């Protein structure tokens, strides 16, 4: 028997909306009861889906540093089910094919070290729950911070050992140290796996004018993020679809999962870290416009031209998500008992030698 997603009756959608509204004002008991009942019927016979996420960043890109801090690492630390989300993170070096030219291009030069750190996870998408990917991504974030904040090249090299320590990666006598000191990262940038993945993404991005790093592909579609804490739509060369539940990357990924896993409960009901920003005009098209301009301070990323999502599409997406809120309600009760809701990284941690990960108390409204 083939499992498939069921159509949401209008009456079911109405009850879910009412239950959601009640939950915000009069406690969760009514919402929990209604949502649990609806969830049992709505998810019966439904095979859990799987989300694929690919993130490409530039090593000198302020936007990319902010996105790692507020989106990538919190997603990796969210304890999502290992079998529901696959992810790959790669530096973006699109057009350099000569090693001498790479040595003269700082984005390519520093990307070699990042490829060394990502060597164990870059060849294919890996589980979002991979401890190895979490450590590799912390190393990348640490080095990104050093590069973006203007450290001298030799100082950045000297700090690689510090970044490895903070990411819980071995350094002295390790493969990582050997790779960075031998320049093997260049060979990884020239590998068939990297080149094929980069070319696939570039072909897709070339069809979408006026975009800039980081480049986030969700199930093969370009995810439009106006800032490091606000993603709002999906784009292809032929269509644009507004997300029914915009917000942080974690919320967007969770909104794509059906049935909803327990770890997504709170963020779908309330996304306390979401920060919507005013769109800014990007002058000139192509990958790379204004990635380190003055607008970075306000996270004015978004390219000009509003998305033209259709209302029926939004409603259908919202309906599917709301039907899943039976699982959300159960997850929310469990998650509200935890003291840590999200993860936020601060640049001061690097300067003061504090651990990269800081747990925040939940309950922000």
Image (cartoon, rainbow, N blue to C red):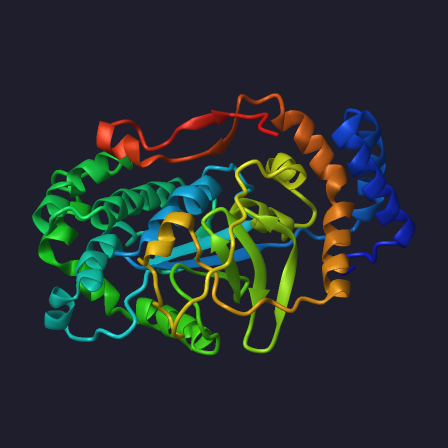
330 relative position to 250: left or right: right
Question: What number of labels is visible?
Answer: 0
Residue in the foreground of this view, choosing between 61 and 204: 61
Report the residue at 81% width, 56% height from top.
6
Q: Is residue 53 visible?
A: yes
Q: Quadrant of the C terminus?
A: top right
329 relative position to 159: left or right: right
In this view, 44 is above or below 282:
above
Q: Quadrant of the N terminus?
A: bottom right
User: Residue 65: x and y, percent?
Assistant: 34, 49
In this view, 352 is above or below 235:
above
46 relative position to 149: left or right: right
User: Residue 172: x and y, percent?
Assistant: 12, 38
Report the residue at 52% width, 58% height from top.
52
104 relative position to 96: left or right: left
User: Residue 91: x and y, percent?
Assistant: 31, 59
Spot the residue most to the right: 11
Report the residue at 25% width, 65% height from top.
189
Report the residue at 76% width, 38% height from top.
326
In this view, 29 is above or below 237:
above
User: Residue 176: x and y, percent?
Assistant: 19, 47
Q: Is residue 130 visible?
A: no
Residue in the foreground of this view, choosing between 163 and 81: 163
């Amino acid at each position: 028997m083939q499992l498939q997603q069921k159509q949401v009756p209008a009456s079911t959608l109405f009850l879910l909306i009412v239950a959601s509204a009640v939950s915000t004002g009069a406690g969760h008991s009514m919402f929990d009861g209604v949502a649990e009942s609806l969830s049992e019927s709505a998810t019966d016979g439904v095979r859990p889906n799987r989300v694929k996420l690919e993130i490409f960043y530039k090593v000198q890109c302020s936007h990319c540093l902010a996105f790692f801090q507020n989106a990538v690492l919190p997603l990796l630390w969210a304890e999502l089910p290992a079998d529901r989300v696959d992810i790959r993170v790669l530096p973006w070096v699109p057009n350099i094919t000569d090693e001498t030219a790479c040595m003269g291009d700082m984005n390519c030069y520093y990307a070699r070290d990042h490829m060394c750190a990502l060597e164990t996870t870059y060849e294919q998408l890996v589980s979002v729950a991979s401890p190895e990917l979490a450590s590799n991504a912390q190393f990348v974030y640490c080095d990104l911070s050093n590069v973006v904040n203007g450290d001298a090249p030799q100082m950045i090299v000297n700090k690689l050992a510090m970044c490895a320590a903070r990411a819980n990666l071995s350094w002295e006598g390790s493969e990582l140290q050997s790779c960075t000191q031998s320049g093997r990262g260049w060979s990884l940038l020239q590998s068939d796996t990297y080149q094929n993945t980069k070319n696939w993404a570039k072909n897709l991005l070339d069809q979408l004018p006026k975009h800039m790093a980081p480049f986030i592909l969700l199930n093969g579609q370009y995810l439009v993020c106006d800032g490091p804490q606000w993603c709002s739509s999906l784009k292809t060369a032929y269509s644009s679809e507004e997300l029914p539940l915009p917000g942080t990357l974690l919320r967007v990924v969770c909104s794509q999962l059906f049935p909803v896993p327990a770890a997504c409960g709170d963020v779908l009901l309330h996304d306390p870290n979401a920060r919507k920003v005013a769109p800014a005009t990007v002058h000139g098209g192509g990958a790379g416009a204004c990635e380190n301009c003055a607008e970075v301070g306000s996270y004015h990323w978004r390219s000009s031209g509003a998305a033209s999502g259709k209302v029926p599409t939004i409603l259908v997406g919202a309906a599917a998500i709301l039907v899943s809120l039976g699982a959300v309600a159960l997850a929310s009760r469990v998650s509200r008992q935890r003291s840590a809701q999200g993860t936020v990284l601060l640049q001061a941690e690097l300067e003061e030698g504090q651990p990269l990960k800081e747990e925040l108390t939940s309950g922000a409204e």
